[in-house]
Amino acid sequence: MRVVTIKCLRDNYAYLVIDDTLAAVVDPGEAGPVREALDRENLRLAAIWLTHHHADHVGGAAELAGDGIEVVAHASDVSRIEGVTRPVEEGDVVRLGRLEARIIHNPGHTLGAISYVVDGCVFTGDTMFGAGCGRIFEGTPAMMHASLQKLAALPPPTRVYFGHEYTANNLRYAAEAEPGNAAIAARAKAMQVPSTPSTIADELATNPFVRAKDVDELAARRTAKDMFR
Ligand SMILES: [Zn+2]
């Protein structure tokens, strides 16, 4: 498996997941840059894997969709995303050539948020970011806490491909939330753009939302981060 990172819109990332000449695109916020990457890499698009219904993640999906292209989203998002052909739930498996991606349901940012776990990688959309997490728009802090802990339980070397380049700002907040954490300072110092992918090990060491000791601390940190600039 190979992954190609594609910059979309202002600070979004789409990703090509590649098996030989077949590709799935994760979260095509717009079609143009995805088409260019497919052409450049000589790939046939076989699937569109959506993490949640927000326009900056699905905006290019309808234009890229077509005959034989599987469009995957959580079952609860079918009414909110045009053209879903494969509604999925926790534990379902979607295929791309020889690859199998397992679905993790991650309510919190939205109720139908999902992640895709495939070949030592996880695509987390707006649930887990580099040193951060998405805003809690539709779910509850308890949901976000459980969702992040589910992701944090993946093997530590798992590479984390997230939906936005927010890592530098997230690390500034992280340093404020945990001033004594040397791993946060070290990550901020070493950070380069693009900062994707990180690893579950990085997030366990530096992500103040993953590291929150309980739901109350997660909620307090999320509220503080919402106001942080
Ligand atoms: Zn979102």
Image: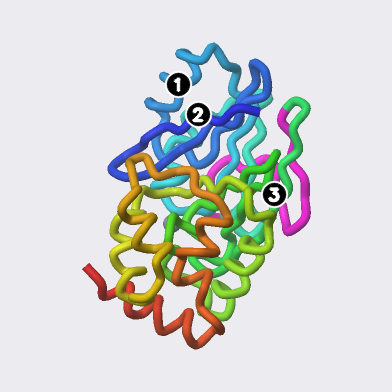
Q: Is residue 178 left or right of residue 97?
A: left
- Residue at image position (57%, 80%) is 142
Query: Which residue of the protein is positioned furthest toward the bottom in this rendering?
Result: 216
Q: Quadrant of residue 104?
A: bottom right
Q: Amino acid at mark 2?
A: Val
| Image-quarter location of ligand 1 | bottom left
State which quarter of the image contains the C terminus: bottom left
Residue 219 shows which numbered tag? none
Q: Which residue corresponds to mark 2?
A: 4
Sequence-first disc among 2 and 1 = 2
Q: Is mark 2 within 8 Å of ligand 1?
A: no
SS category of the residue bearing label 1: helix
Sequence-first disc among 1 and 3 = 1
Write down the region rendered in magenta. Answer: 80-96
Q: Which residue corresponds to mark 3?
A: 87
State which quarter of the image contains the N terminus: top right
- Residue at image position (41%, 68%) is 135
- Residue at image position (40%, 71%) is 181
Residues at marks 2 and 1 touching, judged by CB atoms closer than 8 Å = yes
SS category of the residue bearing label 3: strand
- Name the spot of residue 55 as percent of width and height, x first: 41, 49
